[in-house]
Image (cartoon, helix red, strand yellow):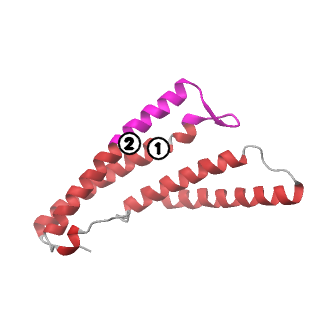
């Protein structure tokens, strides 16, 4: 479902951007709220992409130490990095919830009549999903470290 939503959002973003360019060059006009909506779509596509990468354990990973260690230490190092990622993502999700609540309380508008809290709701959702996924991945790597299986 995440992949389908990602593809739909990306197609919508590309289509709207193409229309904006076409309309400006041919008709000397464009959709007034098109550019702010495109910025929102970029945000949503980026965060859904991060969630999809987290699902497949394909986030950006800079880990020099584990390259020089074998199993089971490689998996043990991954437990630490997974837990760190989960904690940071959880903290960011909590702060994003506060941001969304404040945006709703102040009735801020993102563009047209769309409230800011709605466009920013991807933030707590994505960071929350990342926190849960990396917490689960830390358990997977912990089991692997005791089983002595080779890392992929």
Please state the horizontal and vertical placement of residue 16, each as a whole percent of the image: 71, 56
Name the image quarter holding the C terminus. bottom left
- Residue 129 versus residue 76: which sits nearer the camera? 76
Residue appearing at x 49%, y 34% in the figure? 100
Instruction: Give the class, few, some or many, for how many residues have Cα within 10 Å of label 2's Cα (few <14, many ≥20).
Output: some
Tell me which numbered mark, 1 or 2, is placed earlier along the sequence: 2
Tell whether position 29 is magenta: no
Residue drawn where x is 19% and y is 62% of the image: 77
- Is residue 134 rendered to the left or right of residue 13? left
* Residue range of the region highlighted in magenta in the rendering: 91-117
Q: Residues within 10 Å of mark 1 (few under 14, many from 20)?
A: many
Residue 61 % position (x, y): 33, 64
| Drawn side of residue 46 relative to residue 53, left or right | right
Please state the horizontal and vertical placement of residue 35, each as a whole percent of the image. Answer: 70, 48
Front residue of 36 and 8: 36
Q: Residue at x 38, y 59 (%)?
A: 54
Q: Residue furthest top?
A: 105
Alpha carbons under labels 1 and 2: distance apart: 8 Å
Residue 123, numbered label: 1
Q: Which residue is mark 2?
A: 92
Indicate whether 71 appears above or below 19: below
- Within the magenta stretch, is there residue 103? yes
Name the residue: 24% across, 52% down: 83
Q: What label does residue 42 carry, if any?
A: none
Residue most toward the right? 27
């Amino acid at each position: 479902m995440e992949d389908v939503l990602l593809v739909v959002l990306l197609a919508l973003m590309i289509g709207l951007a193409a229309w904006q360019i076409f309309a400006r060059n041919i008709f000397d006009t464009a959709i007034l709220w098109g550019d702010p909506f495109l910025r929102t779509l970029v945000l949503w596509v980026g965060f859904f992409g991060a969630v999809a990468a987290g699902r497949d354990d394909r986030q950006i990973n800079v880990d020099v130490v584990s390259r020089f260690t074998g199993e089971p230490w490689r998996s043990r190092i991954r437990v630490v990095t997974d837990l760190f990622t989960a904690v940071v993502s959880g903290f960011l999700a909590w702060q994003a919830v506060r941001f969304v609540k404040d945006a709703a309380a102040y009735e801020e508008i993102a563009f047209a009549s769309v409230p800011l809290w709605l466009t920013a709701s991807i933030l707590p959702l994505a960071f929350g999903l990342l926190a849960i996924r990396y917490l689960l991945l830390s358990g997977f790597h912990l089991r692997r470290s005791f089983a002595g299986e080779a890392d992929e």
